[in-house]
Image (cartoon, rainbow, N blue to C red):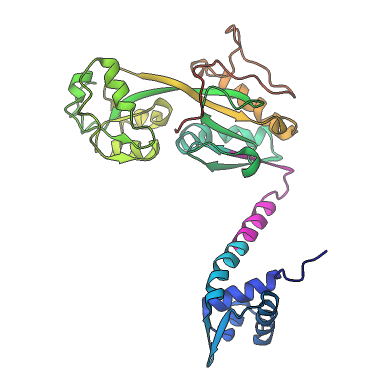
Amino acid sequence: MRNVHHPTVAELRAFVACMEKGSVTAAADSLSLTQSTVSRSLALLEEKLGVPLFHRVRKRLVPSDAGRLFAVDAAGILARLEEATVKTMAFGGRRDILNLAVLPTFASRWLTPRLQGFPAAAPEISLNLAARLLPVDHERDGFDASILRTAQGPAGFGALMLEADRLVPVASPRLMEGGAARDAGALLALPLLQQATRPTLWLEWFREAGLDVRNILRGHRFDQFATVVEGAVAGLGVALVPDFAVRRELEAGLLVPASPRMLSLAPPYTLVYPQRSVERSAFRTFLRWLTELVTEAPSQLAGTAPDGTGAREPSAGVVPPGPTVTDGPPLPE
């Protein structure tokens, strides 16, 4: 049964337009409606809510306290409706859309460049990639899968390991003054770029080198690896970043290795997904394609069977997790 107190979309649009324009005349013009239509919608809305939303001062509409409060929610409702409409229209001629939450730098530097072959393999599937730094609630947020730094998903989740977490120190050739890669001690004389969501990376790198670590946390700070890389290219300092995030800069000569030492950490970058996703044929297609992709690069250690003999074949069931490096919750990128 319809709740007679619920506003219609037309009433909400008329109200929001009146809030933005300050008069019925201007609101009607912006909506391409007549003044009488907007006035009627506004009157019906106020009748349903039982409170005045505006004070009429000459020909101007001055929002009441209730009107100002309601305007925030009304605008949000219309924005969410528009977003939902666009998402639905995005299906177009395709049958399926997969929603993936991915760590930002991994999405831009690892996953997106590899997606060029996916449309040909699955022309009926669209991918919706959302950048997320923190773990997501797959049920609440509507994600079919997510890519995180974790050894395995929550109970009942499948997992496919995509890339080990290997960090390399890199810097602009200008900062290195054209010299060769330096040892750990020499790096202490250079500015070190910091990653805000993983603030202990340089500590761990220098700790493995056996050096005094008390003076290494100073330097420009960034919240994503992508901006750390840009800072290094700009010559702001030495960056300690995942190797996959700087491959193109190294190939182009924009960055050079600042030291031959690499820092390998756990856990790896892993695709995790709930059981319900595996019940969708579109997701099984994507999972099969991604598994084949990562098994072409043995250094990624992705999809390797426990005995190291080769890749697992995705099935209609949950794909077991890749090699376990560490237990614990997903971590930032």
Location of the C terminus (image quadrant):
top left
- Quarter residue 291 falls in: top right
Q: Residue at x 26, y 24 (%)?
A: 258
Left or right of 185? Residue 68 is: right
Q: Classify 230 as above or below 31.
A: above
Query: Horizontal placement of 168 versus 95: left or right?
Result: left
Residue at x 52%, y 26% (from the top left corner)? 150
Instruction: Between residue 267 and residue 121, name the one nearer to us.
Output: 267
Tell me the residue at 63%/60% (across/down).
Answer: 82
Quarter of the image for residue 95 reads top right
In this rendering, the answer to whether 58 lies above or below 74 is: below
Q: For residue 80: magenta?
A: yes
Give percent across and percent down for residue 228: 34, 37
Magenta region includes residue 162: no
In-front residue for pair 69/225: 69
Q: Position of residue 330 (x, y in %)?
A: 51, 29
State whether residue 79 is above or below residue 26.
Answer: above
Residue furthest to the right in view is 1
Quarter-of-image position of residue 180: top left
Residue lying furthest bottom in this view?
58
- Looking at the rendered structure, the number of numbered marks drawn on it comes to 0
Range of residues picked out in magenta: 79-100
Q: Position of residue 268 (x, y in %)?
A: 49, 23
> Which quadrant is the N terminus positioned in?
bottom right
Q: Nearer the viewer, residue 88 or 251?
A: 88
Q: Is residue 133 visible?
A: yes
